[in-house]
Structures are given as C-alpha cells and as structure tokens.
Amino acid sequence: MLPHLRSGTVRTGGVTLGNHLLLAAGILGTTGASLSRMLESGAGGVVTKSIGPYPCEGHPGPCVVEVGDGVLNAMGLPNPSKEFSGELAVLAGKPVIASIYGGNPDEFRIVAEWFAGQVAGFELNLSCPHAAGYGASLGSDPRLVEECTRAVSGLRLPVWVKLTPNVTDITACGLAAERGGASAIVAINTVKAMRISPELRRPVLGNRFGGLSGKAIFPIAVRCVYDLYGACSIPIIGCGGISTARDVLEMMMAGAAAVEIGTAVKDNPMIFRDIAAELYRPDGIPADELVGCAHE
C-alpha cells in the first residue's frame, strides 16, 4: 500500500508552498491568468515561462511534436522580456517562482532585478538544450553555473538552479550551484533529442533537434535526483515525467523535497488537484520520513 503524506503547507528552498507540487517552467506560464488558474487548480506553487534580457520570438515551427511516451519541443525561449512584469501584478503574495535566463552572469542579475519585488524566488534556466548561447550552453560548465548563481543569490532572494541532464556528471554542476549560494536545485530539464520524418526526409522540428520531456524521461530524472541528493546538502526539486502520485513518492524517495510537473498538464489541466487527492491525508506521514529514504 502506498504511503500518504501529511497535508499542509511546505517550506523548501526558501519558499513557502501550498503543497509539494509545482507547475514546471514553460507550461501555461506565459500569463498571470494561466498561472493563477494552476494555483486555483491545486498547484502548491508555479514557475513562470523563462524570461530573458531581450524579447525573443523563438524558433520557427514545428516547435512541439508528440513522440510515444514523451513530447519533443524546441520553442527557443520565446518571451516578452521585461514587459512580463505586468503579468505578475495579479499574483502578488502567491508562491510564484520566476524562471530567468541570460547569456552571462550579468544578464542573469539584470533580469532578476526586474522581478525582485514581485516574486517569491528565482529559477535559473541553465539547462535549456536548444537555445544557442543560453541554458545548457552555460549550465554544462560548473564554473559558469557557480558564477551565474552567485550573481543572482546576491539579491538575497531564494535561488533555484535548474540543471541539465545532458552532462557527464550532474553532481559537479549541483555542487557548483551550491557553492554559488543556491537555495535549491531543480533536476532535470529536457533531454536533448530529435526525430526525423522518413516521408519528408528531414527532422520533424523546425530547429532540427530539441528537448524530450514526459514519461519517457522519468527514470533519467529519478537517477539524477538520486545522485544529487547523495552529493549536495541543499534541497532538490524533482522534475521530469511526473504524472501520478506514485511518481511523486518515488521521486521523493530518491531525494526530492518537492516536485515540478509540466508535460502531464497537457493531458490533464487538473492534475495537481487529482494527485493531491491521492497523495495527502490529514493523518499522513511527514514528508521528511520519505525524502531520500531509498539511500538508507
């Protein structure tokens, strides 16, 4: 029989959440209305679409293709840049994490300063696999991970660092984020991947390759969380292919203090409510009894 968790608010990575379930970056995070809808639908917190130093239209289509148990995407970080601040007014006081990116530590700091008074914390996108000069281009280098993290942690707000699985040793990047002052690590972003259409004789995505998300990458995410929990001392936020209460428990047993859910929202916009109904009971066990128990 699966255990139940005790219901109630959660404090992790310097942020107070309504529960352990957050909306991941890039999914329904482009407007204040859509973020509010996710909170009203049972999410304990929400992460915005990644916002950068300059407005960006993103990659040419097709940008999203379903592939078996996953979704392949190459959006190219489309965002309105500083103008996004107008979307945050309706979310004042809510557990909103701003996902931000830049091409260097200074750009990360500049973007963070725009939203410092409007959000509960930041998630540094150091892991997008399909945006040249951003994301994983920086996040695969532990030195740059540390420098970008330090640039934002100096603002004295919670800083979560989202890591890429597309590296030889994810723990090296996790430890770099910790040295830079991160409040938590988010693992993982999408896995670098591509598909080719035999009929068209060309890649199915306009950008040729992209990132794979969804159920197909869940075992990869579990392994990354497990490794990071064993190496780092700050909280880990598990992300990648989570779609059931059982997945949440497995990720927590690997070491996650909370989880983010993204692709599964596509098929069930009420997934946070549904998972919470199965996961929580007033007399459930404290989450601390489960987090990392698979290491014992």
Image: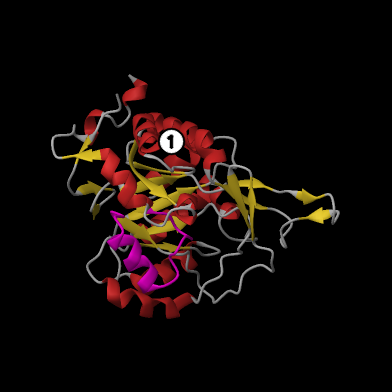
Secondary element at tag 1: helix
Residue 28 lies within the magenta run: yes
Residue at horizontal 36 percent and vertical 22 percent from the top = 295
- Marks counted in the figure total 1
Classify the position of the C terminus by image quarter.
Answer: top left
Question: Where residue 22 sits in the image (x, y, percent)?
Answer: 35, 52
Question: Where residue 262 sits in the image (x, y, percent)?
Answer: 46, 52
Query: Is 233 above or below relative to 161?
Result: above
Res 155 → quadrant:
bottom left
Please tell me which residue lies in front, 127 or 18.
Answer: 18
Residue reaching furthest to the top: 296
Residue at label 1?
Answer: 225
Asked whether residue 130 appears in the rendered view, the answer is yes
Res 132 → quadrant:
bottom right
Classify the position of the N terminus by image quarter.
Answer: top left
Question: Where residue 31 sits in the image (x, y, percent)?
Answer: 41, 73
Residue 24 lies within the magenta run: yes
Question: Where residue 288 sits in the image (x, y, percent)?
Answer: 23, 33
Q: Amino acid at mark 1?
A: Val
Range of magenta residues = 23-44
Residue at horizontal 41 percent and vertical 57 percent from the top = 269
Residue reaching furthest to the left: 283
Please tell me which residue lies in front, 209 or 38.
Answer: 38
Residue at horizontal 42 percent and vertical 76 percent from the top = 84
